[in-house]
Image: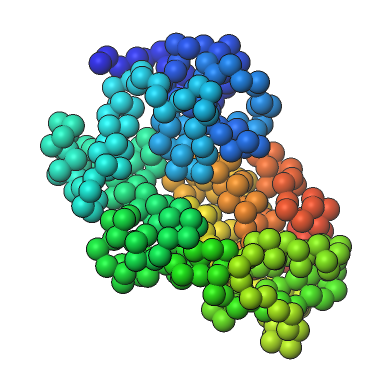
């Protein structure tokens, strides 16, 4: 298959192809819609979203890895490849996905597509943003999560996903599941969560934690609404209010909000993907009083086109203030997109600038 040199390389050109529903670009890229969580081929007949709600991916597998689902109407995963490079990467993804025993080595993959291990690694990483081994590891962990959510035993989930032993899965659990596999399985089943609520400079503040660490930090105007949100996130956990047990952690966050403590350093127990963790770590590295754009954070992660994915990682951050997602701003520096309201985000940034100055 010949390479097609006229493929749109910039997002503006891709957007034009989407607006024109140009079937000539099917297979060249897919576009994903933030509000629906769905990705489509350019010619999809569905209603067009606003430009600011759209992210582009070179291959369907990259969109799926970012958390989007394929459109059932246009079936973008079935579009024929328009470029030899993209077709090769998609073939590699299929080989990794269909591997029965472990993750294929670079040498094994290279032999099947006619590439050297070094060339294959570079090509795959350029399109997908991760290595073939990382892609395979993410697939296995994703399969475990889905099976656990369906109520299957942990043993069945881990062996069905390709883990050779339970120890390998539990080694990965703290970094990728937050809670152990058992408690992740059904909305925190088996986990004991204590929480406390207090007044803060930004309204009511809820802090919740397991025995391992803080699992939620929320801001709002109404205690009942904050408690409902906690219950919705952990519907199967044993939740109780315990202001005494959470006093130290609640006090640390209040001290930060009141300007008496520049940083919040608390143990965490949260559920997250590897990419979310990477974004959150970058957020924690931003000095008080400063901000970074979503694009700058994406570039710092080596994924310059993942600004929207960075935005989603910020929006799904369950421990605001501890992980300072308010320090991420729009491309023009605009203060937008904060789970607890733009007004609170602006107030946080203004307070931090005053303290840092």
Q: Is residue 19 above or below residue 75?
A: above
Is 247 on the left-hand or right-hand side of 104? right
The x and y percentages for residue 52 are 66, 31
Q: Tell me if I can see residue 141 in this picture.
A: yes
On the question of residue 296 being in view, the answer is no
The residue drawn where x is 51% and y is 11% is 22
Where residue 99 sits, quadrant-wise, is top left
Give the quarter of the figure containing the C terminus.
bottom right
Give the vertical position of 167 relative to 334 (above or below): below
Q: Residue furthest bottom?
A: 244
Q: Residue at x 83, y 68 (%)?
A: 223
* Residue 292 image point, x, y percent: 62, 50
Residue at 49% across, 32% down? 70
**Which part of the image, by quadrant, shows the N terminus?**
top left
**Is residue 306 left or right of 87 when viewed as pictured?**
right
Q: Residue at x 17, y 38 (%)?
A: 110
Position above or below: 185 against 22: below
Residue 170 falls in image quadrant: bottom left
Task: Count all numbered tags in the image, as a single digit.
Answer: 0
Q: Is residue 42 above or below residue 333?
A: above
Q: Position of residue 176 (x, y in %)?
A: 45, 62
* Left or right position of 194 against 282: right
Viewer-side residue, 301 vs 357:
301
């Amino acid at each position: 298959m010949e390479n097609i040199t006229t493929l749109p390389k910039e997002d503006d050109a891709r957007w034009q192809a989407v607006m024109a529903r140009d079937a000539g670009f099917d297979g060249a890229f897919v576009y994903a819609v933030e509000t629906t969580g769905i990705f489509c081929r350019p010619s999809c007949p569905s209603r067009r979203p606003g430009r600011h709600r759209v992210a582009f991916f070179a291959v369907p597998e990259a969109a799926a890895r970012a958390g989007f689902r394929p459109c059932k109407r246009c079936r973008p995963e079935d579009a024929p490849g328009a470029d030899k490079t993209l077709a090769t990467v998609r073939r590699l993804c299929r080989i990794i996905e269909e591997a029965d025993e472990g993750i294929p080595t670079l040498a094994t993959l290279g032999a099947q597509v006619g590439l050297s291990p070094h060339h294959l690694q570079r090509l795959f990483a350029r399109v997908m943003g991760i290595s073939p081994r990382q892609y395979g590891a993410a697939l296995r962990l994703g399969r475990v999560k889905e099976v656990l959510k369906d109520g299957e035993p942990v043993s069945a989930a881990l062996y069905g996903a390709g883990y050779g032993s339970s120890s390998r899965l539990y080694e990965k659990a703290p970094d990728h599941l937050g809670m152990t596999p058992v408690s992740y399985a059904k909305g925190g089943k088996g986990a004991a969560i204590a929480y406390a609520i207090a007044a803060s400079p930004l309204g009511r503040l809820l802090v919740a934690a397991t025995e391992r660490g803080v699992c939620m930090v929320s801001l709002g105007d109404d205690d009942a609404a904050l408690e409902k949100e906690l219950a919705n996130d952990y519907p199967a956990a044993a939740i109780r209010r315990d202001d005494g047990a959470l006093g130290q952690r609640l006090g640390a966050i209040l001290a930060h909000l009141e300007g008496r403590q520049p940083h919040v350093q608390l143990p965490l127990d949260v559920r997250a993907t590897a990419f979310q963790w990477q974004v959150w770590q970058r957020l924690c590295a931003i000095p008080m009083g400063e901000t970074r754009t979503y694009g700058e954070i994406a570039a710092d992660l080596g994924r310059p086109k993942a600004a929207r994915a960075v935005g989603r990682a910020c929006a799904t951050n369950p421990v605001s203030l501890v992980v300072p997602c308010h320090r991420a701003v729009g491309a023009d520096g605009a203060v937008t997109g904060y789970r607890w309201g733009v007004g609170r985000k602006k107030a946080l940034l203004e307070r931090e600038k005053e303290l840092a100055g």
